[in-house]
Image (cartoon, rainbow, N blue to C red):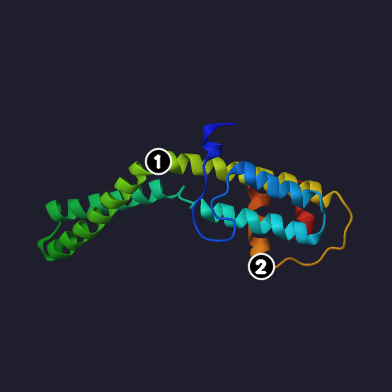
Amino acid sequence: MRAELEGRGSGLGRYQGLTVIEIEALFAACRNDPSMRSVRSVLRITREQLDARGSLGGFPYLAIGLSVIALVALAMVLFGPRELLVTARMALIGFGTTAAATIYGVLNTRHERRANLVQEAEIRRLAADSLQEILAHEFPRKPLEREHIAILQELIKREPRERLDSLL
């Protein structure tokens, strides 16, 4: 097993801090009992574990965006009209400080973020495979709740499988 998959997520919830191996064991128990309860369990565990990993993949883009805005504010301070000097300075101080803090956070958490992204992809794959296997059996279908539908739609988008659409 790759080193990135050995880490634990953090966060809140009953299933906080599970490794991918522990999640796989929970999914295996759900596959052994094909029912809507198992479907809901797989979706709930998936949502909780993705949330526990923080979903920090967009923070580098946020840091870049804040840096660009800070650079525009700097250009306004240096080359802009005098009427906008006070506003440009305030924007430079605000966006520059926020950009610096975000860049610091991005650089300090880059290894954890990379490992979490690998873990998230593996959790999605395991969830889609487990749901595919559960749905191969016949059992009474019931409508899913809104939070289950949201994570199912994300799974369908990122891990397309032929049977998953039948749950929507």
47 and 26: which is toward the camera: 26
Residue shown at 42% from the left, 38% from the top: 111
In which quadrant of the rendered image does the C terminus lie? bottom right
The percent position of residue 133, horizontal first and vertical second, equals 80, 46
Circle 2 packing at 10 Å, graded few (<14), some (14-19), many (20+), is few
Going 66% across and 67% down the picture, which residue do you hit? 146
User: How far separated are the C-alphas under marks 2 and 1?
Assistant: 33 Å
| Residue bearing mark 1 | 110
Percent across and percent down for residue 41 are: 70, 58
Visible in this render: residue 40?
yes
Give the quadrant of residue 112: top left
Secondary structure beneath dot 2 equals helix
Is 25 in front, or is 127? 25
Where in the figure is residue 16, as x and y percent of width and height? 55, 55
Residue positioned 34% across, 42% down in the render: 107
Amino acid found under the numbered disc labelled 2: Arg
What SS does tag 1 mark? Answer: helix
Asked if residue 106 lies left or right of residue 161, the reply is left
Horizontally, residue 81 falls left or right of residue 70, namely: left
Q: Which residue is mark 2?
A: 146
